[in-house]
Image (cartoon, helix red, strand yellow):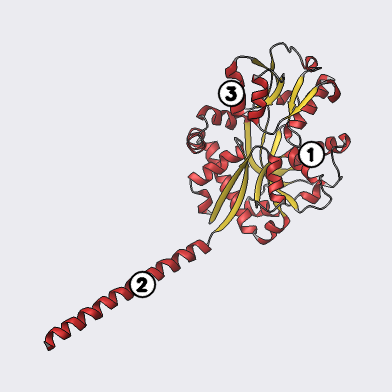
Amino acid sequence: MHKKLIVLLGSLVAIIAVIFAAIYGLKSIDSSSKKSSSNSTTIRLGLMTNSGGQYLAAIAKKEGYFSKYNLKVKTTTFSSGIETVNAITTKQLDIGYVADFAALNRFGSSSKSNLKIFAKLSSSGGSGVKLYTTKDIGSLADLKGKNVLTSKGTVTEYWVAKTLKKAGLKESQVNLLSVETGQEGLALMKSGKASAVWASGQDAEKLEKTGKFKVLTTQGKITSPTLAFAISNKKFLKEHPKAAIAYLKAINDSIKLVHSHPQKAAKIVSSALNVPKKTVLATFKSTNFKINFDQSTYNDLKSIYKYLAASGKLKHTYSINKYLDTTTLKKAISGSVSYK
């Protein structure tokens, strides 16, 4: 009986030891997990649907470029860049992807803003963006009296303004119909309620498939390339400089993959976003992906600003320099900043 008691007590001690070991082990694992988690920073990223910025982010996520630089990214997509800027303004996002016109237009909506452009990510134009019209329109002058689609506050508004100037027409000589999404524009074109629309990517492909429209001209013949930027706010860039640097480095790795292995990059984007591979490749071909901020970039921004100021579309005039902060870019990519 005495021996049985000793065996029983020994067994209990062994069981208790195993339990303590298991508990300690779980605590160690949990502690290690928290430590690993604390080494990375989570940013909220805003992207335009079917944009080059969305493509690059998809590549960075799939290839592990974000995690390579200890970055976790939560993405939100919008139909236009102006929505992205608004979300940053209301502190719903940390970093956003936005086109030149939308950013400059938004800066002029308030005299007090902490928004900052901190890098140029790409430029696009040439034949990638096209003006689709009904087949009865033979020249730009024929747009007179027609329903022309635009999108207020976005780069499309700028393209339309430049188109009308090229045609020698005033805004009052056409019927401008503002839409918020590409789908809305497609519906108006297909129903015959609109005669002209600027489109690219999947929207352009859908218009072509109908067989009802033709390409009257391309962006390269109307205006300068459209620039896309990384935008944030003063507080985020000051408090989380390493996160902003990590974001630029990860996106730069995506750009390197696009340049060196476009087929592989396109396959990744196609699978991640359910976009036809040929559409992705067409975007790659018509877009110059390069993270920098040079004199040409600065001059193009000044040109757009002059248009906005002269047209009376700005509620508040301002200096472009107030909304530029390339400190992060200089640290992320050596030799990438060169403007006066």
Name the residue at 59% across, 31% down: 283
Please indicate whether residue 64 sits to the left or right of residue 307 in the image. Answer: left
Quadrant of res 327: bottom right
Report which residue position mark 2 lands on.
23
Report which residue position mark 3 lands on.
205
Give whichever of 56, 182 is nearer the camera. Answer: 182
Give whichever of 125, 141 is nearer the camera. Answer: 141
Callout 2 secondary element: helix
Q: Amino acid at mark 2?
A: Ile
Report which residue position mark 1 lands on.
299
Image x and y of residue 75, in percent: 58, 47
Image x and y of residue 202, in percent: 58, 28
Front of the two marks 1 and 3: 3
Image x and y of residue 68, in percent: 51, 53
Choose the circle earlier in sequence order: 2 or 3: 2
Above/below status of 49 relative to 143: below
Above/below status of 78 relative to 278: below
